[in-house]
Image (spheres, rainbow, N blue to C red):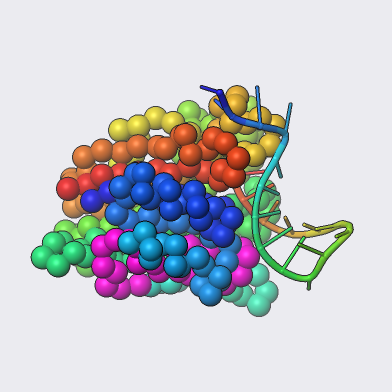
Amino acid sequence: MRIATWNVNSIRTRVDRVIAFLERSDTDVLAMQEIKCRPDQFPRAAFEEAGYEVAVHGLNQWNGVAVASRMPITDVRDRFAAQPTWGEPPVVEARALGVTVQRPGEASSTIWSLYVPNGRELDHPHYRYKLAWLRALHADARTWLAADPGARIALVGDWNVAPTDQDVWDMGFFEGKTHVSGPERAAFAAFADDGWVEVTRPLVTNYTYWDYQQLRFPRNEGMRIDFVYASPALAAAVTGAAIDRDERKGKGASDHVPVLVDAD
DNA sequence: ATGCCTCAACGCTTGAGA
């Protein structure tokens, strides 16, 4: 099966590009982030015409996650346990969507489409929210592995963390900024301590995001912040990975590109 | 070769993104 994750930065603006990507890439399950709409605003028909079922979780114009699958969807969850809230009154934002997919007679796989909070500034409450969010996900994901060590689970999406210095175009530029701080990197790396395997890094090198401003893409001044953590059973089945850099080109591109993983 | 920011909404300005 081919899994992909893509921060689409508004599905309503990008639907033609996303459908074209699905058809071009032969993707079975696509996890999307930043759909920026409610379920009733999601362009569901275009996906169904292309042969995909859709699960959508969106509350308003901010955030929003979805999964499109041409394998039957058998279970959907719109948050993880103890997912932290943001704002006053507190809201569990639309940043996590877990979808189980299964073809009859085959093993099931659970794909979590994740949009980790940005953090904004190191001294901003949003940064503390980001760390709490990552730590809560880590704690819950640990229980999933403990409950079923052979489960095929993928934690995919926009992690909003650049795990190494090589994952940003200039560490000097990011000094004192989010995405590269020690606590964020530690929170990301902690998943590996439980057996989660980030399966893209050994197979492909590229950035996954380039800011719209200041010619960041033509200058290749990007960041690698979109990743696929696979459970041990799924990681053992991985045969390939890719970053579709070309999707950043041209008019109407998202600022992120798709990250793809193949697994038997 | 990619091209100097984009998106949605309480909209003609603002908040958010990273």
Q: How many marks?
A: 0
Q: Position of residue A99 (x, y in %)?
A: 34, 66
Q: Quadrant of residue B3?
A: top right
At 49% from the left and 48% from the top, the residue drawn is A17
At 36% from the left and 59% from the top, the residue drawn is A50
Q: What segment carries the magenta color?
A: A52-76
Of residues A1 and A207, which is closer to you in this image?
Answer: A1
Q: Position of residue A141 (x, y in %)?
A: 34, 61
Of residues A11 and A97, which is closer to you in this image?
Answer: A11
Q: Position of residue A106 (x, y in %)?
A: 13, 62
Vertical side of A32 occupied by A94: above or below: below
Of residues A25 and A254, which is closer to you in this image?
Answer: A25
Q: Is residue A214 visible?
A: yes
Q: Is residue A125 left or right of residue A226?
A: right
Q: Is residue A181 visible?
A: no
Extreme-left residue of the structure? A105
| Magenta-colored stretch includes residue A123 | no
Extreme-front residue of the structure? A49
Of residues A241 and A137, which is closer to you in this image?
Answer: A241
Q: Position of residue B9 (x, y in %)?
A: 71, 69
Q: Quadrant of residue A59?
A: bottom right
Q: Is residue A150 left or right of residue A114?
A: left
At 35% from the left and 32% from the top, the residue drawn is A204
Q: Is residue A199 left or right of residue A135?
A: left
Q: Is residue A115 left or right of residue A55?
A: right
Vertical side of A106 occupied by A179: above or below: above
| Magenta-colored stretch includes residue A57 | yes
At 18% from the left and 64% from the top, the residue drawn is A103
